[in-house]
Every structure is written in structure tokens, then in C-alpha cells.
Image (cartoon, helix red, strand yellow):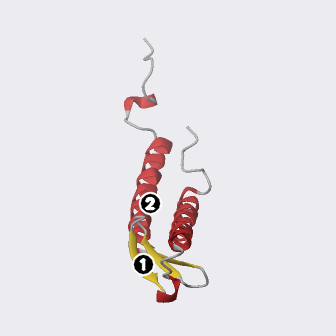
Amino acid sequence: MAKRGGFPGGMGMPGNMNNLMKQAQKMQRQMEESQKALEEKEYTAAAGGGAVEVTVSGKKELTKVKIDPDAVDPDDVEMLEDLIMAAVNQALRQQEEDSAAVMSKLTGGLGGGFPF
């Protein structure tokens, strides 16, 4: 009586599936290493011609804010707030772009997913 289901020969995973699993494990290790390297990087951006400069970590945490004393105008606090927001958003965009580029390189442009 013929056996239904399972793998031919009754021997665990066939060679192609085994190779696919090894490749997936290798990709996972590379992604973990890349993620760690990204988290250790810093991204600095400025606004207002350098009046405000901020640094964010690869973990998307604000780690440094530098404000030129000339940018501090008690009569125009909104301008300083806008400069800080612009600089932080630019630094975060740099981090996002760097992260996306690294992940795209690892996945070969699969869009972060697998085709199955």
C-alpha cells in the first residue's frame, strides 16, 4: 500500500528544504548583526543654518541637542521649536533610510518578506 503525505523515502526534510532552512538561518544571523550595527550608529542633522543640531541613535533615541545661543529668542520661541522639530525629523529620516537600505540589501529586495 502506497504511503500518502510526508516526504519521499521517509527521511526527514528533502535536500532543497534543508538548504532553504540553512539559508533562512544565515539570513536571520546577518539581519541580527546588521540590526545591532545600525543600533550603534548615530545620525546628526541640523536646521536653521546650524542654529540647532541634534543627534539620534540607531535606536531612534534623541541623544544630543545643541542650540546656538543666538537662536534663543524669548520673543520667538516657536521658531526654536520648529528648528528642533525639523532637525530631529531629518535625523530620524536618515536613520530610517539607512535601516531600509541595509535590510533591502540583506533581503535582496524582497520587501522584508518571503515569497511564500
Residue at the far top: name it. 1
Q: Position of residue 88 (x, y in %)?
A: 50, 69
Q: Earlier in the sequence, mark 1 or mark 2?
A: 2
Residue 79's tag is: none
Q: Which residue is mark 1?
A: 65
Mark whose residue sits in front, 1 or 2: 1
Seen at 47% across and 49% down, the residue is: 19
Seen at 37% across and 35% down, the residue is: 12
Please indicate, yes or no, whether residue 42 appears anywhere in the rendered image: no
Q: Which residue is mark 2?
A: 31
Seen at 41% across and 38% down, the residue is: 13
Name which residue type carries label 1. Val
Q: Position of residue 110 (x, y in %)?
A: 60, 50
Image quadrant in which the C terminus is located = top right
Name which residue type carries label 2. Met
Q: CA distance from mark 1 to mark 2?
A: 30 Å
Asked whether 59 or 52 is in front, the reply is: 52
Image quadrant in which the N terminus is located = top left
Residue at the far front: name it. 75
Please indicate, yes or no, whether residue 5 appears anywhere in the rendered image: yes
Residue count near mark 1 (Cα–Cα under 10 Å), binned few <14, some 14–19, many ≥20: some
